[in-house]
Amino acid sequence: MDVVGDVRLPPRPQVPTRPVQLPPRPPRLLGRDEMVAELRARLAGGRSQPCVVAVHGLGGVGKTSLALEYAHRHLHDYQLVWQLPAADPAVLSAAFARLAALLGLRDTVDAADPVDQVHAALAARTEPWLLIFDNAPEADALRPFLPPAGPGHVLITSRSGSWPREQGLELPVLEPEPAVALVLARSGQDDAAAASAVVAELGALPLALEQAAAFMSETGLALGEYLDLLHDQRAGLLAQGQAWGYEERITTTWQLAFRNLAGTSRQAIALLRVLACYSHEAIPYHLLLSPLEGRTARELFAEDVQRQRAYGRLPGSRVRLVREFRPWMSAVAVLQELPRDPLAINTAVGALRGHSLIGQPVEGTVPVHRLVQAVTLDQLAPHEQQRWRDAAAVLLESVLPDDPTRVAAWPRYALLLPHILAALTPISPGMDKTAQYLGASGDYRTARSLFREICEALTAKLGPSTRPR
C-alpha cells in the first residue's frame, strides 16, 4: 500500500505490459516475401533456443528493412519484441539498461550488469520473445550480448559476412522485376523501360533505387532524364536524394568500411581498387594476381612493353616511347601494393568479405557490385584512377594465352571476356587477341565488330598510313 502524507492509497493494480520497441514498418517491401518466409522458417525451425539468424550483406541491400518487416508481420507471435542498436558496444549496453528498467529489473542506482539482468529475465520467460541486434559489426563483438537461454529468437543485421554458416543468411540485391516495380512505385512514374535501365545502372541495390526515386520525386525529374544524369554526373548524383528508412546515402554507406580497411589492411584496399577496374561479374582474382607471385612489378611492366611493341602499338622513337609509357610506369608502384602470395591474397579477400564489399568467393572468383566499384574509384583523383586501370590492364594482359586460336585457350578467354571488354583499350594486344579468339571460336559478328573498333582506334592513334604488324 502506498502512503502520500497521511493518506494511505490502495495498491495500484499491475498493468499487463507487452514490451515492444520497433521503428515504423517499411512502406510496401517489394521482392522480399521469400526472404521473410525464409527467416520465419529458420527461426521457427531452430533446434536450439534461443535460435539465432544473422542477415548479412552489402550496405544498402535492405537488411534492416527485412528485419523490421519480419518483426511487424509476426508481432503477435511474441510477448516481447525489442530492437537494439548494435554498432557500438557502449550504446548497446545502454540499450540493455533501458530494457532492464522497463522490465522492472533495474533500480536507478543499480550496480548489476544490465546485460546479465536481461539475459536472466529472458531465460526465465515461458512465452516467446524476439531481440533484433541492428547493424552488428561482427560475431565476436556481439557474442557477450547474445542471450544464452530462453524460448526466444535472435535476429541480427550486419554487413560482416563472417558468421557461422548455420546462423548466416546473406541478403542479395533485388530481382529485376520487383526492382523495376520499386522504382516506378516510389517515383510515381510509368516508364518501365527507363526504370529497367536505371535498375541495371544501379545494380538493383535497394538503397540506390530508393534514393534515385526519392530524388526524382523531389525534383520532378523524369526517369530518362535521371538516367542521362547518371551517365554524365554519377558521383554527384549518388549523393542526392534521401531514401525513406535510411540514414545514409550511397556515397557514405561504405565510407566506414573503407576507412577501417585503410587503417588495418592496405592490401585489401589495393585489391578492391584493382577489382573495381574490371567488370562487376565474377572476377577470377586468383588467376589475375598469379603473375605477381613469380615476377616483380617491373618485370610485368617490361613484358607489357614488349607485348605492345610486338603488336606495333608503340612508336619507334625512344623519346616518344618514354612519353607514351610514362603514365603506365606509375602502375609499377600500384602493382607493388597488391597482395602477392596465396595467403596474403586470401587474407585481403577475407577482409573485404568481412565488410561485405565483395560477394561470396567461389573457386577463385568473386563478384563486386557495380556501385561498390564506382564509389571505390570515385574516391580517387582522375590520375589515380588511371593508375589503377593501367595496373588492372597489365595483370589482365599477363594472363591471356599467346595463341588465341588454340581450342585449349578458349575457356580462359571466355572466362576473362567481360573483364577484357571493361579493362582493356581497343589498341591493346589483349583486345586484338580477343578478337582473334572470337573469330576462331565462331562468334564472327562480335569478332568483326571488335576488329573494326581496333582498326578505327589504331588509325586515330598512328595515322592512316601506318600498318600495324
Image: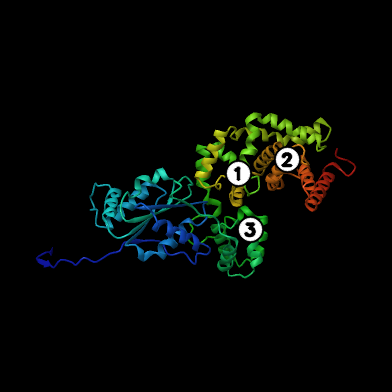
Label pair 1/3, CB-CB below 8 angstroms:
no
Q: How many marks?
A: 3
Which residue is depicted at the point 83% across and 37% down? 312
Q: What element carries label 1?
A: loop
Foreground residue among 103 and 229:
103
Q: Name the residue under label 2.
A: 408
Type of amino acid at the residue the image marks with label 2: Ala
Give left or right: position of 381 versus 211.
right
Give the mark toward the camera: 2 or 1: 2
Instruction: Work out whether mark 2 precedes mark 3 in sequence or the reverse, and give the earlier one.
Output: 3
Question: CA–CA distance between discs 2 and 1?
Answer: 20 Å
Give the mark toward the camera: 1 or 3: 1
Question: CA–CA distance between discs 2 and 3?
Answer: 34 Å
Q: Is mark 2 on a helix, strand or loop?
A: helix
Quadrant occupied by the N terminus = bottom left
Question: CA–CA distance between discs 1 and 3?
Answer: 22 Å
Which residue is depicted at the point 35% across and 64% down? 77
Depicted 310 relative to depicted 110: above or below: above
Q: Name the residue under label 3.
A: 200
Give left or right: position of 134 versus 119.
right
Foreground residue among 75 and 52:
52
Where residue 135 appears, x then y in whole percent?
44, 51
Where residue 359 appears, x then y in whole percent?
55, 48
Foreground residue among 324 and 435:
435
Where residue 401 appears, x then y in whole percent?
73, 38
Callout 3 crowding tier (Cα within 10 Å): few <14, some 14–19, many ≥20: some
Instruction: Work out whether mark 2 precedes mark 1 in sequence or the reverse, and give the earlier one.
Output: 1
Callout 1 crowding tier (Cα within 10 Å): few <14, some 14–19, many ≥20: some
Q: Which mark is residue 365?
A: 1
Q: Which mark is residue 270?
A: none
Type of amino acid at the residue the image marks with label 3: Ala
